[in-house]
């Protein structure tokens, strides 16, 4: 009886390992938002502080606001952010 129980436990263990290998773990919520382009390169996504849209960092409209570099989806969102927060902008910051 104990021998059958031990064999049953071993069977369940291997079944669990098999199922675990078939379904990879999901990324954590805290991980960075990344995507792969056609060439397989990984590009970081940044969130627009004005409208909340995620944009590829390489395509984002980047501006220095006070001491931080912020990334926007468009120039219009950048100007809205600046007028709402009464911040000064330094032009010419590259992403």
Image: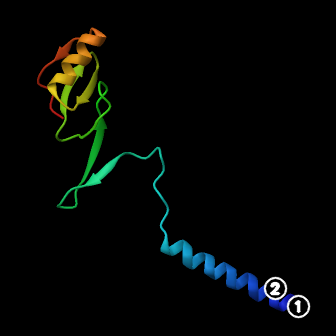
Identify the mark at residue 1; answer none if there is no mark: 1
Residue 53 coordinates in the image, percent (x, y): 29, 35
Q: Which residue is mark 2?
A: 5
Q: Residue at x 47, y 58 (%)?
A: 26
Neighbour class for label 1 at 10 Å: few (<14), some, many (≥20)? few
Query: How many marks on residues?
Result: 2
2 and 1 marks in contact (CB < 8 Å): yes
Q: Is residue 41 positioned above or below 3 on the image?
A: above
**What's the residue at 21%, 24% (across, down)?**
77
What colouring style does the render use? Answer: rainbow
Residue at the top extreme, as displayed? 86
Residue under the image location 56 percent in, 79 percent down: 18
Tell which of 33 and 74 is nearer to you: 74
Query: What x and y, as percent, mark residue 47?
Result: 31, 34
Q: Quadrant of the N terminus?
A: bottom right
Which label was assigned to residue 63?
Answer: none
Residue 15 to residue 37: above or below: below
Residue 5 location, x and y as percent? Answer: 81, 85
């Amino acid at each position: 009886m104990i021998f059958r129980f031990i064999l049953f436990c071993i069977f369940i263990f291997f079944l669990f390992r098999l199922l675990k290998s078939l379904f990879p773990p999901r990324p954590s919520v805290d991980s960075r938002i990344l995507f792969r382009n056609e060439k397989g390169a990984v590009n970081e996504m940044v969130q627009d502080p004005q409208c909340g849209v995620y944009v590829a960092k390489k395509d984002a409209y980047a501006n220095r606001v006070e001491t931080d570099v912020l990334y926007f989806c468009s120039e219009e969102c950048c100007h809205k952010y600046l007028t709402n927060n009464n911040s000064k902008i330094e032009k010419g910051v590259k992403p």
